[in-house]
Image: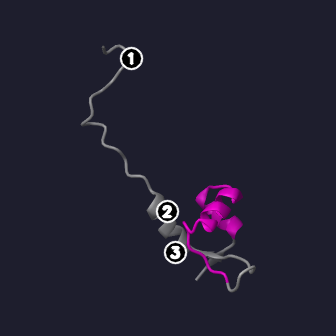
Amino acid sequence: MVLFSRKEAAEILGISMSTMNRIIKCNKIGYYQARPGYKIQISQEHIDKYMARVEQKPRNLCNQQAHTWYNH
């Protein structure tokens, strides 16, 4: 199993380190840590689960009435 540092995981996810730290603190992403204060490591499975959870489904705009600036 490949483990990534917080910085590497943040780069994979395309987020800042402050955002990475926030999602770890809020338990939005899983991680491994041998003991409190030891380094945090994040697996590809943790990253995949996080991405699946935050993925946004596309909205179906075809069934909604089209609004344009010239419709009154």
Neighbours of disc 2 within 10 Å: few (<14), some (14-19), many (20+): few
At 60% from the left edge and 63% from the top edge, which residue is drawn?
23
Q: Amino acid at mark 2?
A: Met
- Disc on res. 45: 3
Name the side, left or right, on which 35 lies relative to 63: right
Asked if residue 15 lies in the magenta stretch, the reply is: yes
- How far apart marks 1 and 2 lie (CA) works out to 36 Å
Name above or below for residue 38 compared with residue 19.
Answer: below
Residue beneath disc 2:
51
The residue under label 1 is: 69
Q: What's under tag 3, amino acid-wise?
A: Glu
- Mark 3 or mark 2, which has the lower sequence index? 3
Q: Residue 64 in the image: x percent, y percent?
A: 27, 34
Quadrant where the N terminus is found in the figure: bottom right
Residue at disc 1, secondary structure: loop
**What separation in Å lies between label 3 and label 1 (alpha carbons)?**
46 Å
The amino acid beneath tag 1 is Trp
Residue 18 x, y percent position in the rendering: 70, 57
Q: Position of residue 66 (x, y in %)?
A: 30, 27
Point out the tag, 3 or 1, that comes first from the N-terminus.
Answer: 3
Asked which quadrant contains residue 26, the reply is: bottom right
Q: Which residues are magenta?
A: 6-33
Badge 1 local density, few (<14 within 10 Å), some, or many (20+)? Answer: few
Task: Give the mark nearer the N terminus: 1 vs 2.
Answer: 2
